[in-house]
Image (spheres, rainbow, N blue to C red):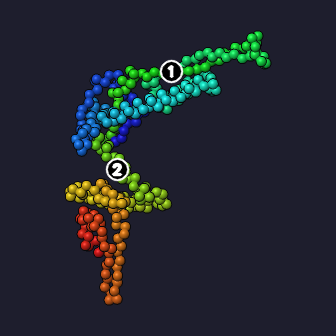
């Protein structure tokens, strides 16, 4: 499942329907996201009319109340930045040494600003030409009352703009709307949305293959060896994930909000494997072999934090390392 690109025809048609006739589009409430104080953070809805893409995949249209507010703020910011750029451009046109003396150059400069901030639908620009007269002496010398002057007329350009309020109002029904396309036939709309919301967590986990494990580059020739090496890294990633899961669930069961895993003993509410391993970096294990062949295992004395982590993971500190 993935977000349908804005360049697709299905996206353009649905948003145009929202702009022109928003009433026939009906939405069904899915679920709410609330904060710890029970205040509403986000509300998700889905269009009751399920669509199908050109490839035959399921197409869901969702609406997020939080995304709607963000879209409105983003659009307002784009318009403000575009107007500031247009104002600066107009000042350049009015300057005595302006290089925008041809209408096509002015039109290209204005269009570049509108395209940069994607505000052409909401900002209307009118370019006007005005005649500027300048007078110069016809011959050199000190001017007097009989000195003839030559009039020179040049065309200078300026422009004005106005906000299309009707277009802005028509854009509001599109705020907070996003489409998801999926080939999962057994999932309903809410399950599709929940699965999509979990994707960033999975992507973040696999990003550790390149960051913490430094998998790439792999200097191997045979594909089977590359597959085997990646399988080992995947198992290590799986062990790391399970360790974090067990530790966080144990903290939740024992109502422990955080552990002092960060530098200077700062609280860590969601411990990671990397932080846990750093806590145990100073632990050493030595095997002392006596003359009679008897072996003695010596392990560094564990700190209270290390003992607490081992107990949360179901490991006895007395037998750790032995």
**Mark 2 surroundings within 10 Å by alpha-carbon count, few (fewer than 14), some (14 through 19), many (20 or more):** few
**Is residue 307 found left or right of 152 in the rendered image?**
left
Residue 172 picture quarter: top left
- The quarter of the rendered structure image containing the N terminus is top left
User: Which residue extends farthest top?
Assistant: 146
**Disc 2 element:** helix
Residue beneath label 1, please?
Answer: 160
Q: Are marks 1 and 2 in contact (CB under 8 Å)?
A: no
Q: Position of residue 229 (x, y in %)?
A: 41, 61
Identified at 63% across, 24% down, the residue is 96
Identified at 37% across, 31% down, the residue is 72
Residue 215 picture quarter: bottom left
Q: Nearer the viewer, residue 172 or 185?
A: 172
Identified at 36% across, 63% down, the residue is 278
Residue beneath label 2, please?
Answer: 202
Residue 227 seen in this snapshot:
no
Q: Give the mark nearer the N terminus: 1 vs 2.
A: 1
Q: Is residue 100 above or below residue 218?
A: above
């Amino acid at each position: 499942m993935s977000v349908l690109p804005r360049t697709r025809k299905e996206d353009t048609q649905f948003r145009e329907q929202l702009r022109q006739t928003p009433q026939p589009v009906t939405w069904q409430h899915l679920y709410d996201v609330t904060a710890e104080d029970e205040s509403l953070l986000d509300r998700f809805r889905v269009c009751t009319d399920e669509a199908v893409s050109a490839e035959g995949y399921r197409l869901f249209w969702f609406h997020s109340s939080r995304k709607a507010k963000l879209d409105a703020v983003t659009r307002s910011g784009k318009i403000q930045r575009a107007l500031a750029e247009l104002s600066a451009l107009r000042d350049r046109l009015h300057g005595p040494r302006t290089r925008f003396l041809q209408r096509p150059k002015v039109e290209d400069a204005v269009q570049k600003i509108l395209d940069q901030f994607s505000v052409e639908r909401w900002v209307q620009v009118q370019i006007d030409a005005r005649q500027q007269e300048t007078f110069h002496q016809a011959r050199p010398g000190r001017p007097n009352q009989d000195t003839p002057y030559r009039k020179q007329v040049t065309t200078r350009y300026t422009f004005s703009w106005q906000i299309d309020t009707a277009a802005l109002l028509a854009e509001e029904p599109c705020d907070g709307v996003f489409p998801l396309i999926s080939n999962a036939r057994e999932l309903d709309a809410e399950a599709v949305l929940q699965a999509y919301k979990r994707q960033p967590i999975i992507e973040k986990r696999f990003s550790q293959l390149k960051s913490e494990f430094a998998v790439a580059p792999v200097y191997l020739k045979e594909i089977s060896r590359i597959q085997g090496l990646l399988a080992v890294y995947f198992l290590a990633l799986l062990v790391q994930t399970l360790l974090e899961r067990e530790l966080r669930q144990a903290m939740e069961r024992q109502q422990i909000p955080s552990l002092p895993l960060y530098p200077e003993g700062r609280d860590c509410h969601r411990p990671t494997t990397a932080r846990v391993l750093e806590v145990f970096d100073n632990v050493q294990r030595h095997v002392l072999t006596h003359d009679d062949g008897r072996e003695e295992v010596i392990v560094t004395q564990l700190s209270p934090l290390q003992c607490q982590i081992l107990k949360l993971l179901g490991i006895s500190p007395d037998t750790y390392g032995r």
